[in-house]
Amino acid sequence: MTVVVVGGGWAGLAAAISLSHQPRAVTLLESAPQLGGRARVIKLGGRILDNGQHLVIGAYHRYLYYLQILGVDEREIFDRQALSFTLFDLEGMTRTLKAPHLPAPIHLLIALVRGQGFTAQEKLAALKFCARLSWRRFVCDPHCSVADILNQYAQPPALVRALWEPLCIATLNTPIASASAQVFLRVLRDTFTRRNKDSHLLVPRCTIGDWFVAPATDYLLAQEVSIYPNTRVVALKIEDDVVQGVTTSDNQFYPAQRVVLATPPHVTASLLRGHPMLDELASKLSMIPYEPIVTVYLSYGPGVTLGMPMLGVLGGTTQWVFDRACSGDDGTFAVVISAASPLRDQTNLTLGAHVAKELAQVFPHLPPAISIQVVREKRATFLCTPEVQALRPSTKTPIGGLLLAGDYVDTGYPATLEGAVISGYNAAQISVQ
Ligand SMILES: Cc1cc2nc3c(=O)[nH]c(=O)nc-3n(C[C@H](O)[C@H](O)[C@H](O)COP(=O)(O)OP(=O)(O)OC[C@H]3O[C@@H](n4cnc5c(N)ncnc54)[C@H](O)[C@@H]3O)c2cc1C
């Protein structure tokens, strides 16, 4: 039995790891020179940086399970911290939420009750919201947007702006007016209501390449998985409704009884097109829209620190600021701007200068930035709306032996590292059946 995994992002890597435990030959084909996909390292201005600042939380169970398989001690790459964040409002007061070491969901309720900068009315509304969602098991009409559900539960506009909107944009990369309430509620449920440690923030101690890609590559090579970077798959071979293998741009044919396509939806759509049984699936996938994320790296020189691993900013362009000192980049901050399509026409120079100005407003004693670099990922994630939820495919396709993986496959989660890894795991499980 031969299995070909197409795409070496986190979904493809997870699939290859699980498949490597079976008695079968596994080949991983990746079009880029490096593995990691959207969660990779890049070289910028002579430095190794993340393609975009990422955050991992304790609820990423499947990812943490893979770390165990790879023999990586979580503490080597992350500093686990209890849920705690500060939101600095450029137009008003600072708000903080800090969860105590108590079982979930009590820790969340106490964090809300003790939250600083929130009015009594806002706290009561947030508590009622959580209680009523819990009563309804965090399930809602799948057609609802996050704005609809917040409105339905009478959330005060100031609370929406200071809490629910930043949380929704950070997790779904979609504005509240169009974001899927069902997916957002699932994120809230899995992060805050089950175990205290699910809501932990895993502050990275190293660049993103060491979180998964480097140990996964070593592991796969040790398991005798063949890895081919710079190898673009351009066609599938299908006979009698069963997959036979894939062809690459250099006209090589890789025969396989199972093929896991762990490519982004637009690439998967182009590979599926032209096969009568796959045309409907291909046209659905080609309708999945993307939303950009922008990361602005600002270097201030050694010793300059935020004083905390991350900080939220309200009322401007900046959304979240990460102190990169923990990842070995002393004096560098990463500013993350999600749902960034409105910034499409702004030049990097203007955007960088604007973000630097906002940071100077938050930290008046900050020295001038030595360097500012902007990384834009146009297809950062799929736009997580109720309409797109209906387009997300399952792992299985109508073609025998052909399976799909990737953060866009219907796992119930938004486009995240955890969603990608779950999809890869699922594809591997099904392919051994
Ligand atoms: C800036 C940014 C910030 C993010 N922040 C977070 C965060 O904080 N937390 C979080 O959980 N998630 C975050 N995400 C989302 C996360 O990065 C993605 O959900 C995840 O990396 C998707 O992995 P994947 O394997 O599904 O897809 P991809 O990473 O896109 O992998 C697909 C792979 O297929 C390869 N490929 C494409 N075409 C072919 C072909 N024809 N042949 C062979 N190979 C091919 C690609 O080169 C790529 O390596 C962020 C994403 C971005 C861009």
Image: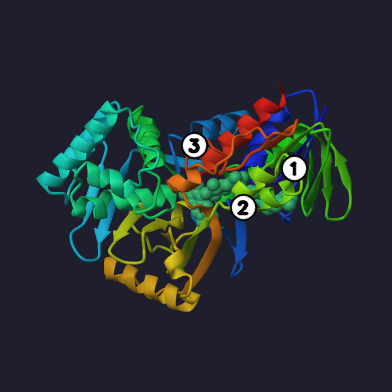
Residue 276 has which mark? 1
Between residue 431 and residue 400, name the one nearer to us: 400
The disc labelled 2 sits on which kind of residue? Ser
Q: Indicate left or right for 141 with 202 as reference.
A: left
Instruction: Tell me residue 263's x, y (percent).
Output: 67, 47
Disc 3 or disc 1, which is closer to the eye? 1
Q: Which residue is mark 3?
A: 75
Between residue 416 and residue 336, name the one nearer to us: 416
The correct choice, above or below, for 270 with respect to 362 in the image is: above
Instruction: Tell me residue 286's x, y (percent).
Output: 61, 52
Between residue 27 and residue 432, name the one nearer to us: 432
Residue plotted at (52% across, 39% down): 418
Residue plotted at (27% across, 49% down): 163
Earlier-in-chain disc, 2 versus 3: 3
The disc labelled 1 sits on which kind of residue? Pro
Q: Quadrant of residue 59?
A: top left
Quarter in which the N terminus is drawn: top right
Is residue 378 at all visible to an observer of this figure? yes
